[in-house]
Amino acid sequence: MTRRRVGVFGGAFDPPHVTHVALARAALDQRDLDELRIFPTGHPWHKARVLSAAAHRIAMAELAFGPIPGVIVDPRETSREGPTYTLDTLQQLQAEQPGAELVLIMGSDQARALPGWHGWREIVSAAIVCVAERLESAPSGVAAEPTDPLPRPASRFDPGTLPGLPAEARFEFLELPPVATSATDIRARLARHQRISGLVPPAVERYIDQHHLYAPPPDDH
């Protein structure tokens, strides 16, 4: 009997953009997932920056991913107190869906940094790690923030470079078209009152405008 495959895709989604949506569709198409769960992060353990309110990020994730069949936006991480750890989420999913094969989706830079993750050996034992990489023809020089799940790789990720990798660890790969969208750039554009059409789904763009998200702080003078 074929095991049910459940994709796990987490990130700040601050805001979710067209590359996030492309990854979700590619994961469902290329990795034969029965279900893909989207997890807006709670309090990132690395404390890279202050995130937008969870309610806004959840709402935008629903608008961005909701129309895709097989995708579920799961807000559980945003309600946790203290730092958010991927291992906790995977263990909860294992308890809820015993026998399911969990597929954890991440960018290649995140995969290289796995030894710095909380309980990383337990993570790679609990789930297949699916590494999303942009095609080699993609332009370089676009910086990504730590909470962006799709940083641009310098070269193809080799799992064998991870020190102390458990023997049972499994990896899969996901190819994305060359794109240069990043949440960092989108927020910077909005802070400069620049347009973001084509960088985020239209419904997300309308939500951002309606709620005045990422606007520059008012002038005190």
Image: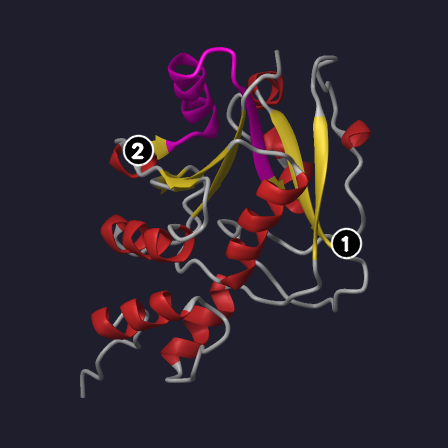
Q: Position of residue 124 (x, y in %)?
A: 62, 22
Q: Residues within 10 Å of mark 2 (few under 14, many from 20)?
A: few
Frontmost residue, 142 versus 7:
7
| Vertical order, 3 against 197 (above or below) | above
Instruction: Name the residue: 22% across, 69% down.
Output: 211
Q: Is label 1 or label 2 in front?
A: 2
Q: Is residue 123 left or right of residue 174?
A: left
Mark 2 residue element: helix
Q: Quadrant of the N terminus?
A: top right
Q: According to the image, label 2 marks what residue?
A: 76
- Which color scheme does this rendered protein use? secondary structure
Q: Let me know if residue 218 appears in the view.
A: yes
Highlighted magenta segment, given as a residue range: 84-105
Question: What amino acid is found at the position of numbered circle 1 in the picture?
Answer: Ala
Q: Is residue 210 magenta?
A: no
Q: How many angstroms separate mark 1 from mark 2 (CA)?
A: 33 Å
Q: Are marks 1 and 2 in contact (CB under 8 Å)?
A: no
Q: According to the image, label 1 marks what residue?
A: 154
Question: What amino acid is found at the position of numbered circle 2 in the picture?
Answer: Arg
